[in-house]
Structure formats: structure tokens, C-alpha cells
Amino acid sequence: MFFDEFKWGHVLSYGAACKRFKAFHFCVSEFNCMNQISTILQTSTFYSIPKHMDTDAIGDLVDKLKAIQNDDVEDQDEYDDFDDDDDEEEEEEHEPITLGFVDKPKNKWSLQRQYFPSKAGGVPAWLDPLNIPSGGSFVCDICGDPLQFLLQVYAPTEKETTFHRMLFVFMCPSMKCLLRDQHEQWKHHPEKPSRSVKVFRCQLPHVNPFYSPESPQYNESHGPASSGAVLCDWCGTWKGDKICSSCRQARYCSEKHQVMSWRTGHKIACPQMKVSSLVSESNKIGTTSLESHKVGSKNLWPEFEITIEDESEYNRDMCEENTLSNSLISRNRNDDSLNSILDNFQGDADKKSWASFQECIDKAPEQVLRYYRNTNAKPIWPVTSGRPSNANIPRCSYCSGPMCCEFQILPQLLYYFGVDNEVDSLDWASIVVYACEASCDASLPYKHEFVWVQIYSPSTAL
């Protein structure tokens, strides 16, 4: 049977499927969506299905999957504590939101901080370049290693104090730490949570010491109004507070990064830097522009620009392209094996949730981010297990006000980062960021926000 071989408990099941979608260059039309299902079902290591099934038969499957999503979920009381009930989800998941896609930047300088970019991978473009998070806030609370930059989203609001507003997401690349993180996030608002994924919110008024109040000129000659803190020569992410005791030039954020740099080249370069009379100007005045700071680490995730598109506009553009494809599909035939597949779907809420999630994603398979703030829409969850309830979402730790869902990071991003499909590779089903609803003006330059990570594995079924 179809779902007898589907590894729902496998940590990599969802991320691997998403990477396969991109690897086969799947399109968003309904005709191609049916071919997608056929291709995935016949090629995935997680599935087993007769290869004689054709596109028409798969069309019937699509229709029936959609019909299943409208059925009442059994044992409804089990889900009463979730942040929204099923009736609300049916309406909210179709409300247009803003989608994020990754693209290689046309110009490297366009991702510098003075252009307020939304970006993924590489190094962060800090909004406040001086008061970067330090101390224990920039390390994984589980293994103690410095966190790696995942992405940042520029999301200003109408308040004067949030004229510029950016959210930064960092995570430990260790899957072992992420699994441990799951146990921590289920704890009821501990005073000192141990997390491997962290989110920081930074905001500035229109007039501030770092940027001109005038709109930036999008050319290479435009620069920020002031310089920033000295950054680590290895990761280019965190403050380089530690200085090499020999050459007094190389700077690092941690002892681990200093050791890694020493082993991969600084051991040879250090004596030359020590006797050299040419001292890097960036180490003197703290310039941190992307074009002047070289990073030693080769393990950073590749850098992309995040471009946005309104979901309603995206659907409207796709509608005309799908018209011809839809007219070519005939749904007159059926297959007994399809009925057995659907019977299995109806018996499991997680499988229904997957079908609903996949229908939504198929509208724009390459999306990596869904932005929800100021909408009534809610996150879409691949599975019901591992979802947070209202009680799991804390109040703002600075103003005690409510937090709202800001955006959701999808596992398609793992494909663009080139993450392998190995058992111990990094993977998630969904990462959802919650931020202070009022975007409160706490005194800290970078404020901790809350993040919920969903992984379908035994560790989430608590």
C-alpha cells in the first residue's frame, strides 16, 4: 500500500520531498502539478505506486485530495487548543499574503546594509551596525558554537520609531542541536530557554545616526552615513572582540572561530601580518561594508536576495497560463489503486494536513517565505503534530504585550542552500517567527523574538 512505505517519522521526509520538487523543475500550472505528483510518486524513495498510472488518473487524485480537505477532521476536540480552528483555517489559508523568493543578486553591492535588503545566506547586513548582539545571545545554547546567519526580512511599519525595521534569523547548522531545540520550545516559557534557533528584531527612526534620511541611491557609490563594529574575520557575522595575540590584526568572535582560522591558513599568514607595516584600515576604524570585509569560512550558506510578490497577483498571472493546460486534462478514468490511497488519507489527520499544505504550496512551488503580519492569515502546517497552541506562544518579554505571527520559512530554502539529503543533515518542516505585535521600543538595539520550529519526528510528538 502507498502509505505503508511512506516514512512519516523520518526527519528528512518533508525537506527531501521539497528538494525533489525543485530538482525536477516543477511548474505551478495544474497540468504540471499533476505531472509533479506522478513523477514524485514514481521516483521518491518514500513512495511505492504502480507506474502505469497516467496523467488523467493523477487528475482524479488531485480532485479527490481537494475534496478530502473539506471533510470534517475526526476527533476535533483534540485540536481545540490550537491557535485557530479548522473553520478559520479553511478561510484564512486562502487569504492572499506576501510571498518571498530567492534570487542571485544582480549586483553584490545591492545587499549592503545601506540598501536595507531582505536576504538569505552569506553574512547579515546589520541594521544597527554598532550594537550587534554579543555575549551568550549569539551562540547556540545547546552546543555553544556561534550561530549561523539564515535570513533577514526588512519589514518597516507606520510608526516613526520603526521607520526602518529588520528581523534577523540565525540557527545552528547541527541537526542534533535542532532536535534538542524541539524539547526546549515545548517548555512553558522558561526564564532561560536553550535554543538553537534565534530571532532578533532591530528598528530605527527615520532620523538616525547610521543612515541618511534621504532615499538611498541605488548605485555602487552610495554608502552608509557611518561605519560599524569590527566583525569576525572567520564568519563575518558577529563582533570580532578577540584579537590574535601574535599579529594583533586578525579578529574573531569566539575561540572556536580563531582555532578554525588558524588551522586553515592564518598560521601561515600570521607572521607575515605581524611584520607588515600595512595595517588594514578596516581594523582601525571598524568599517564593515560587505565589499571590504573578507570572510575566511567556506561553510556559510550561499547568498541570495529575497524578492517579494503578492500572492493574489501571482495567482492572477498564473491563471491565464493555466487555461490551456487545464483544457487538455481529461478526468474520465479512475484507478482502483487511487481509491486505496485516498482511503489511507482519510484515516490520518497528518496526511490531510499534508494534502492541504501541498495544495497551497503548489501555487508557487519556489516560495521560501510567507509573510503574515497585518493579515488574518495563519501559518500553513505540513502536519498537525508539532504545532503550537496559543499557550505555547509567549508574550513579549519587553512590554508584556501579545505577539503576532510575522512570517514563515519553508524548507524549500534548504534546496537553494545545497543542504544534502543525509540522515543527519539539517531539515525542518516549518519555521514560524512571532514578533511583538506593537513592535515595542525597548532599550535594547536588538530584541529577542520568538520562533517555533516544526519537525515531524518522534521528538515533536510530546
Image (cartoon, grey):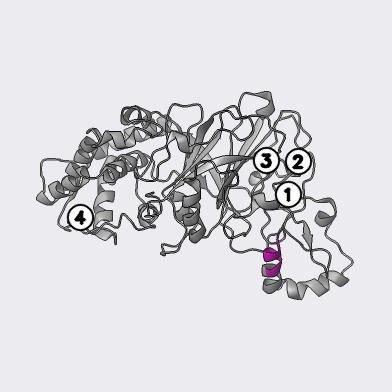
| Residue depicted at x 31% and y 27% | 87
Q: Distance from label 2 to label 4 (Cα)?
A: 57 Å
- The x, y position of residue 379, in whole percent, is 42, 37
Asked if marks 2 and 1 touch (Cβ < 8 Å), the reply is yes
Residue at label 3? 446
SS at badge 4? loop
Dot in front, 4 or 1: 4
Amino acid residing under circle 4: Phe
Check residue 374 for magenta coloring. Answer: no
* Residue 326 quadrant: top left
- The x, y position of residue 334, in whole percent, is 11, 45
Asked if marks 3 and 4 touch (Cβ < 8 Å), the reply is no
Q: Earlier in the sequence, mark 2 or mark 1?
A: 2
Amino acid residing under circle 1: Ser
Residue 10 lies left or right of residue 413; in this view the side is left
Per the rendering, the mark at residue 289 is 1
Per the rendering, the mark at residue 224 is 2
Dot in front, 1 or 3: 3
SS at badge 2? loop
Q: Residue furthest right?
A: 277
Decide whether the magenta segment is chiefly helix, strand or loop.
Answer: helix
Residue at label 4? 2
Dot in front, 2 or 4: 4
Q: Distance from label 4 to label 1 (Cα)?
A: 53 Å
- Graded by Cα atoms within 10 Å as few (under 14), some (14 to 19) or many (20 or more), the crowding at tag 3 reads many
Q: Magenta segment range? A: 254-259
* Residue 19 quadrant: bottom left
Q: Distance from label 1 to label 3 (Cα)?
A: 19 Å
- Graded by Cα atoms within 10 Å as few (under 14), some (14 to 19) or many (20 or more), the crowding at tag 1 reads many
